Amino acid sequence: MANPLAQARYLLAAHTPRQLPPDDGLEVAFAGRSNAGKSSALNAICQQNALARVSKTPGRTQQLVFFDVTPAKDTTTARYLVDLPGYGYAKVPQDLQAHWQAFLDGYFGSRMALRGLVVVMDIRHPLKEYDRQMLGYAVGRGLPAHALLTKADKLSRGAQGNALLAVRKELSSVFGDTVSVQTFSGESKQGVDEAREIIGRWLAF
């Protein structure tokens, strides 16, 4: 079956709420701490090498970056993937952090097009404060969330399974059954089909 996300193309980057596209489509947002593998995950899911920039410098994404995945034969409903700023501990000034906090609060609090959140975490360092905060945003809004434990190829199968179980147990105790979780590797393509299926469902493909 063809991958509808493979047609993803860059649409715009928004630094303020005024720059966001009209709030009448369907969107899935991607969040992840700096260097968690978010750009690699987006590229793998969309079968493109350079859709999202893979940077060695943490915190390169400094806007909400929108990628258009609207099917050519169904232009009535716009569909987007949204790459959120990768600040975990990126070295950004305090006032910029405050701006982003307010922008994200507003985006998660009122954006009607938002249908789900994918939180990308390095399987070796999952559930940091930033990850919990982003999952909390989604759960607070009643939105489904899905955790991608990336860079799974860096661990043995046994260690992957243990990490997955531990994260699933903790997510369940904090958020109930509203957050799903899987192992993932952009490098080996492990879990790519599973992630694609969830995102496709949220975008009503």
Image (tube, rainbow, N blue to C red):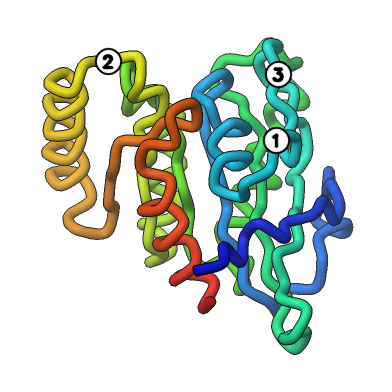
Q: Residue at x 56, y 18 (%)?
A: 35
From the top left corner, tell me how far across and down residue 141 is, in percent.
Answer: 43, 63
Q: Which amino acid does label 2 sit on?
A: Leu
The correct choice, above or below, for 2 with respect to 192 in the image is below
The correct choice, above or below, for 34 with respect to 56 in the image is below
**Which badge, 3 or 1, is on the more N-terminal residue?**
1
Crowdedness of circle 1 by 10 Å Cα count: few (<14), some, many (20+)? few
Please give the residue where the numbered disc 3 appears in the rendered image: 55
From the top left corner, tell me how far across and down residue 9 is, in percent.
Answer: 79, 54
The reply to whether dot 2 and dot 3 touch (C-beta < 8 Å) is: no
From the top left corner, tell me how far across and down residue 11 is, in percent.
Answer: 85, 56
Q: Is residue 120 left or right of residue 65?
A: left
Please give the residue where the numbered disc 2 appears in the rendered image: 155
Identify the secondary structure beneath mark 2.
loop
Q: Which amino acid does label 1 sit on?
A: Asn
Task: Indicate which disc residue 49 carries.
Answer: 1
The correct choice, above or below, for 50 with respect to 88 in the image is below
Most foreground residue, 23 or 73 = 73
Q: Which residue is drawn at 12% across and 34% down?
A: 165
Asked where in the image residue 113 lies, by quadrant, the reply is bottom right
Asked where in the image residue 55 lies, by quadrant, the reply is top right
Q: Is residue 64 left or right of residue 182?
A: right
